[in-house]
């Protein structure tokens, strides 16, 4: 097989040169253009692929080159040459994975959402239109029939469901299609909220230049610790399409970073074709709010304590992802509804497993999509910081019973199919409270995750409150409040917290440190996370992991090793498992995590459990967060005793009914009044020291 | 525009020559083949059509030539040349009426049922398959999805719904498809009853070489009286496909006749490709039964008194068509459920109007499909020998209110759509009785035609009995018995009988003569028809027609004139209208027609009305035919007095319940016994002279 990309770059370059500089001369003088035509024809005549539906990218690249030559050197080709290019297109395209007509793959996820149709076949379709309109009618027909609805549906999330690596390239494919139609003079084919999708990756950017892991990630397999993870065109195309300076800034930032990326080589033709050197970019992303909610079908909140621009591993900025979930899109999305992660001077609460690695026993064997590690561990709930409820009789299509979330089905192929069992979580409440605009003190999100599980779970609701403590020594805390009911009291519930290194358990508290150096000593992580389990009472804390047990499910390890020594995999090797001491149908979990420098000699912030008739919560630093113990929104009068505190405290009471609420501290004058909205259901007030407080709904 | 057929014949011939004689030589020696390739390429490069979806036949011919050259001279073409042929195919085919993909027209009737897909695109699809399988997948995909079901559905009728002219060419298109798939090695794509379809045209062949008119007819517009109407390939292709010697005989007969046909020139390539000189043919069609029933969805019976082979205008053979109907297929089918025709030495009871003619005021204006004449008269019930029930408020989509049958809808596009309101008639009974095998004395068919009309008709049932009198002087009679109930007694009922020349009315009897000579004096018709109206009692007989009133509907004439002086149009100019004298909801009509030589000096056969409590009927010659006056099948004992007759009489009693019946003539010994079957519902017996007969169901 001729290696397509090497050949096609020259052809494209000659064709582009001819378009730019040879247009005014006679066809005979258009030497580069004629060379492009002849090279393309020779290439098309020579290129062969193994039988079958395969090599979508390589075939797509030939098709793209064909389209460019056909369009740019049209006047240099005979009718027979043009027809030959079209004929070879139909032959090559027919053997792409998606086929031609492009009907073999779905339009929602998977390779059908890659460039095959959205860029390559569409480019050819438009180039050939005058002579072979059927190609356009077929390709654009499928596009308009099937591709727009699931994209607009997903764009509403302002996030992408295919994870940190595939998300960017799949979104880039969408943007090629958007641009191609724009360049035809068509109205925008997608909802303009499309431009918010890359904000997902702005918010998940870690100070070390990597992305918070999400779904199947391969950037980690080929980057070293000095690299800024990138997919520049996924930012450039929306930047110029929507004239969005924030995205342009990120594009420029990525382009300027060194990159060893070999999977998605920079193709210098696109900035020429679709770039815009005239438009400005923001100086940095600092102007963005620190917390962003990504609505359904993502159901995600990301809270940060600051922005870095480029690689600044020493930065004290915290990044926390709080995923509840919405629709499960499959393919590169994991069974990870309810999953949270925390980064502070290193990945502390992490996403475990490796997408693209090697067999431990025989490193010549790649382990990728669908490997035993992937299917039994990496994609599964057990590899994430969410809840397990173990029904010993549950069957996961023959894969390991991790006690986690159900398999909604095959990859969905339409929005209609998504509606049929793919909803795994519903956001019930979300609110940002306190602090200056864009820098909330409390970032709150609560959802119902029952649908993520089989009937073994009667109800599972999880609440996250991220506290930006605005304290350099103690920058942030994350409170996780869970109420879980199993359909059988005997089904063990396990609250998970994954870490790269071995956690240290002490009573109800666990310490996770991250102080590793990278292989070339330019990077030193220096973070630690302290979690205290306040509920359930007398919880059992256990750690699982270590050598030969890193990716264990029910006692069976599913090993994998990184692709390369220098890689930036953050696969984890340990997990904390928190379970109730006895068998109850319903349990409540309250865990409070705080982060600080690993090297700090300061004690962790004390955490004080608060327990009243209706409310459970915690005081940390000058913050109090309270939840309804029943999970139900409270009305009437709710009384709670706040612990002593020498100064005022910021109090967030979640799970309240909407309306006007009056807050009175017993033994003091004048009540505090506040409104509780439907959307948030939280009451926020500043308490003047400890004591008994009555919260009264008017 | 280059005239395609002239050019393409040479190309095809060279390609065929190359296939036959140049295969063994080197490509360089294949001179004719290389000429064919170059001529085709030149032709494809030069040919142009006016914009729009048009010229399906001319484009189809180019495509067919392309397919032949591509297939037969494949080794003489470069990959680019082949691709160019495919490209031009897609371009030309896209502008055919049916388009490419062939989705613009329906698969049941109309131009979508012509050669566009079934021959031309399919030929190209197969020729191009290795290099451009999509063409085949698209064309054959549509074929298998949409084309087979409506054809097999219609083939069950052993007749074709698109009339005498279009029927043959549309059926020929079916046969091209059948042959193409057979030559691919596929199993038969259609139900083998397909081969019976051309029997429709065997049975409608008149001794003068023309076909009994049916639907839109154009053969009459360009033939003279010495021509044998023909569509030879519509007989050759099924003859060789099914190895059917009767059809081969008819093919040979047609091929040997002189023909001035310019619409469907003989294409000498098809007998070479699909002919079979080795197979035999029957010496003549004489072996076929004289009466044939064409079941649903045709609901047609054709009765003859003999077979002629070729043009024998002097022949005494009678041909009578008795159409009840089934599904109305539209396009070239008329609103003619219940229509009958009689030919004897000339068209006597005829089908009126002209399909393809000229404007009377300005003969430069062609009047064809959709003309005022066509839409208000020619296609309508009033132009046929059926029943009108005139609701003065009925609206026929703005066309003239002829009192006739409803418009079921647009051209049906599937079998499913046919089921939705296109059923206009149901055959209730049919039977052939008496006489030697294949030469029945009585040919009987009865149906319910209520569905052909709007709600103005409560019920309309028509019975036909054709009597082969086996008498040279009086060869045949046709009895028509109708029971019609209108939803309003005020709606006038009119029984119609169309004639070419002015009828002569005398009391309850009308005489229609046909003695015209054709323009070159080689033809002389010599028939006459005498009809006597026995019911309703005191019926009003009126004639409508004559100069300036030939095609009158409600007092408005819709004139047309034949395409040419020499044409064989039999448009009619007069009609007999028979109506009840008063306004009754329900009326019964009994009309008895007999035919004889116009030049005969013999009196017509006397007809004797028979009327008993339950039965009404007629005696003619030695035949008695009786119907249930109520229309309901009779059981129990039915008594009827038969008129005096000096010898035995053959008696057919219709409308009886199935079972064993006993027939006794009062005052005589031993009863006659017979079985009445469910399918026929008739009792047949030989009566020994007149008298009172008791028919008793056991």
Image (spheres, coloured by chain):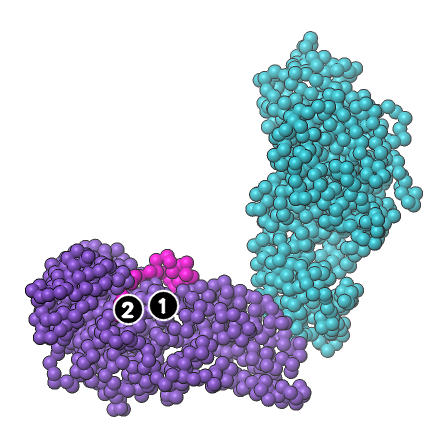
Chain colours: A purple, B cyan
**Chain letter behind tag 1:** A
Q: Is residue B34 above or below residue B139?
A: below
Separation of residues labelled 1 and 2 (CA atoms): 12 Å
Of all residues shown, which one is farthest toward the right? B521
Q: Which subunit holds the residue at mark 2?
A: A
Q: Residue at x 60, y 50 (%)?
A: B413
Residue drawn where x is 66% and y is 44% of the image: B397
Along the viewing direction, whichever of A103 and B39 lies nearer the viewer: A103
Identify the residue shown where x is 81% and y is 49%: B359
The one nearer the camera, A59 or B511, is B511
Between circles 1 and 2, the one closer to the viewer is: 1
Q: Which residue is mark 2?
A: A323
Q: Is residue A91 visible?
A: no
Q: Quadrant of residue B91?
A: bottom right
Q: Which residue is mark 1?
A: A157
Q: Main secondary structure of the magenta part?
A: loop
Specify whether residue B155 is painted magenta. no
Which residues are the magenta region? Answer: A405-432
């Amino acid at each position: 097989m001729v290696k397509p990309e090497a050949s096609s770059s020259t052809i494209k370059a000659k064709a582009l040169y001819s378009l730019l500089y040879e247009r005014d001369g006679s066809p005979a003088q258009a030497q580069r253009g004629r060379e492009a035509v002849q090279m393309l024809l020779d290439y098309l005549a020579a290129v062969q692929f193994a039988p079958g539906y395969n090599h979508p990218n390589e075939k797509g690249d030939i098709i793209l080159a064909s389209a460019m030559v056909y369009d740019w050197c049209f006047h240099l080709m005979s009718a027979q040459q043009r027809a030959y290019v079209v004929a070879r297109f139909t032959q090559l395209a027919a053997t792409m994975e998606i086929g031609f007509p492009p009907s073999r793959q779905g339009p929602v996820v998977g390779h059908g959402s890659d460039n095959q149709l959205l860029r390559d076949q569409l480019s050819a379709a438009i180039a050939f239109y005058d002579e072979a309109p059927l190609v356009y009618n077929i390709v654009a027909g499928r596009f308009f029939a099937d591709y727009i609805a699931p994209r607009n549906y997903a764009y509403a999330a302002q996030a992408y469901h295919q994870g940190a690596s595939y998300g960017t390239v799949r979104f880039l494919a969408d943007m090629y299609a958007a641009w191609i139609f724009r360049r035809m003079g068509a109205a925008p084919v997608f909802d303009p909220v499309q431009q918010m999708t890359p904000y997902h990756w702005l918010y998940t950017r870690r100070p070390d230049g990597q992305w918070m892991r999400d779904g199947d990630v391969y950037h980690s397999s080929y980057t070293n610790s000095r690299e800024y993870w990138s997919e520049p065109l996924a930012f450039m195309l929306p930047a110029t399409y929507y004239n969005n300076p924030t995205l342009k800034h990120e594009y420029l930032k990525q382009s300027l970073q060194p990159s060893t990326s070999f999977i998605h080589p920079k193709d210098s033709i696109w900035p020429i074709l679709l770039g815009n050197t005239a438009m400005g970019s923001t100086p940095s992303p600092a102007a963005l709010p620190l917390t962003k909610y990504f609505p359904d079908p993502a159901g995600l909140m990301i809270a940060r304590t600051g922005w870095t621009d480029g690689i600044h591993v020493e930065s004290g900025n915290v990044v926390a992802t709080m995923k509840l979930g919405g629709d499960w899109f499959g393919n590169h999305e994991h069974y990870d509804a309810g999953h949270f992660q925390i980064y502070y001077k290193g990945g502390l609460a992490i996403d475990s497993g490796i997408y693209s690695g090697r067999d431990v026993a025989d490193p010549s064997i790649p382990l990728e999509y669908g490997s035993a590690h992937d299917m039994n561990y990496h994609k599964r709930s057990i590899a994430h910081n969410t809840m397990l409820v173990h029904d010993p009789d549950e069957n996961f299509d023959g894969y390991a019973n991790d006690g986690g979330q159900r398999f909604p089905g095959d990859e969905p192929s339409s929005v209609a199919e998504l509606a049929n069992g793919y909803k795994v979580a519903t956001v019930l409440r979300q609110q940002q409270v306190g602090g200056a605009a864009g820098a909330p003190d409390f970032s709150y999100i609560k959802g119902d995750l029952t649908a993520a599980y089989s009937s073994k779970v009667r109800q599972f609701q999880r609440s996250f409150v991220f506290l930006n403590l605005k304290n350099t020594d103690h920058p942030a805390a994350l409170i996780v409040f869970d109420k879980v009911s199993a359909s059988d009291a005997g089904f063990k519930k396990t609250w998970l917290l994954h870490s790269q290194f071995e956690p240290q358990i002490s009573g109800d508290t666990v310490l996770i440190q991250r102080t590793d150096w990278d292989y070339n000593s330019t990077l030193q992580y220096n973070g630690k996370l302290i979690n205290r389990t306040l509920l359930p009472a007398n919880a059992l804390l256990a750690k699982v992991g270590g050598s030969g047990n890193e990716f264990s499910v029910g006692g069976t390890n599913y090993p994998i090793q990184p692709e390369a020594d220098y890689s930036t995999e953050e696969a984890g090797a340990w997990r904390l498992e928190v379970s109730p001491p006895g068998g109850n149908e319903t349990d409540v979990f309250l865990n409070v995590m705080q982060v600080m420098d690993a090297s700090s000699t300061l004690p962790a912030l004390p955490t004080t459990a608060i327990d009243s008739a209706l409310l459970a919560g915690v005081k940390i630093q000058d913050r109090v967060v309270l939840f309804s113990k029943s999970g139900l929104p409270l009305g009437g009068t709710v009384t709670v005793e706040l612990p002593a505190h020498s100064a005022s405290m910021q109090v967030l009471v979640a799970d309240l009914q909407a309306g006007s609420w009056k807050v009175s501290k017993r033994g003091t004058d004048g009540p505090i009044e506040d409104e509780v909205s439907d959307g948030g259901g939280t009451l926020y007030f500043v308490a003047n020291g400890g004591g008994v407080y009555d919260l009264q709904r008017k």
